[in-house]
Image (cartoon, rainbow, N blue to C red):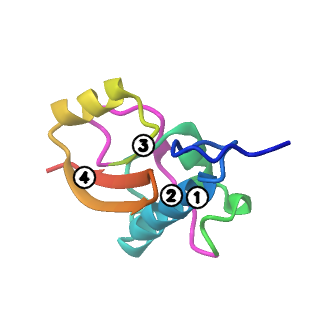
């Protein structure tokens, strides 16, 4: 099997390491802010990374307790990446969420948003 080397990010491309890096940075940012009890929107995979210590992203920190794949008025925070669907980006804009942090590596990026 040969991994693709195109500029797009994906789990079958060498750029996947960039994806892992920016997701780790976003989760580390949320850990540093002590958001483990806050309502956070995240994709399915990011939700696993934030709630399952076995995934390797928490590195001994407490798991996040209130992570949802639903972005709505109950979401206090949100994680978005280069892979987030445009409909969710539009929903984030409707909720007037404010970007707190952005992390990027190669073509991969991850952003953390909060309610105003």
- Relative to residue 70, is residue 55 drawn left or right? right
**Mark 4 touching mark 3, by CB under 8 A?**
no
Which disc, if any, is residue 82? 3
Q: Nearer the viewer, mark 2 or mark 3?
A: 3
The residues tagged by marks 1 and 3 sit, at their Cα atoms, a distance apart of 12 Å
* Of the image marks 1 and 4, the number of the one nearer the N terminus: 1
Q: Is the magenta region chiefly helix, strand or loop?
A: loop
Q: What separation in Å lies between label 2 and label 3 (alpha carbons)?
A: 10 Å
Residue visible at 25% across and 52% down in the picture: 114
Q: Secondary structure at mark 1?
A: helix
Q: Does residue 83 lie above or below 111 as drawn?
A: above
Given this view, does label 2 or label 4 mark the residue nearer the observer? 2
Give the residues drawn in magenta, as a range: 60-77
Question: Which of these two is toward me, 62 or 44?
Answer: 44
Report the Cα–Cα distance between label 1 and label 4: 22 Å
Q: Nearer the viewer, residue 8 or 84?
A: 8
Q: Position of residue 47 (x, y in %)?
A: 55, 46
Query: Nearer the N terminus, badge 1 or badge 3?
Result: 1
Asked if residue 72 is positioned above or below residue 58 in the image, the reply reads above
Do callouts 2 and 3 mark residues in contact (Cβ within 8 Å)? no
Residue that mark 4 sits on:
114
The residue mark sitting in front, 1 or 4, is 1
Tell me the SS state at disc 3: loop
Whether label 1 touches label 2, CB < 8 Å: yes
Give how far apart the Cα atoms at labels 4 and 3 are: 18 Å
- What residue is drawn where x is 54% and y is 48%? 46
Quarter occupied by the N terminus:
top right
């Amino acid at each position: 099997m040969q991994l693709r080397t195109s500029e797009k990010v994906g789990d079958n491309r060498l750029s996947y390491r960039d994806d892992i890096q920016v997701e780790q940075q976003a989760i580390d940012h949320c850990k540093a802010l002590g958001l483990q009890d806050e309502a956070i929107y995240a994709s399915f995979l990011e939700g696993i990374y934030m709630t399952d210590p076995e995934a390797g992203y928490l590195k001994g920190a407490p798991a996040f307790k209130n992570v949802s794949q639903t972005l709505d008025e109950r979401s206090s925070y949100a994680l978005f990446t280069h892979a987030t669907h445009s409909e969710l980006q539009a929903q984030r804009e409707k909720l007037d969420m404010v970007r707190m942090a952005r992390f990027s590596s190669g073509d991969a990026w991850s952003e953390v948003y909060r309610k105003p």
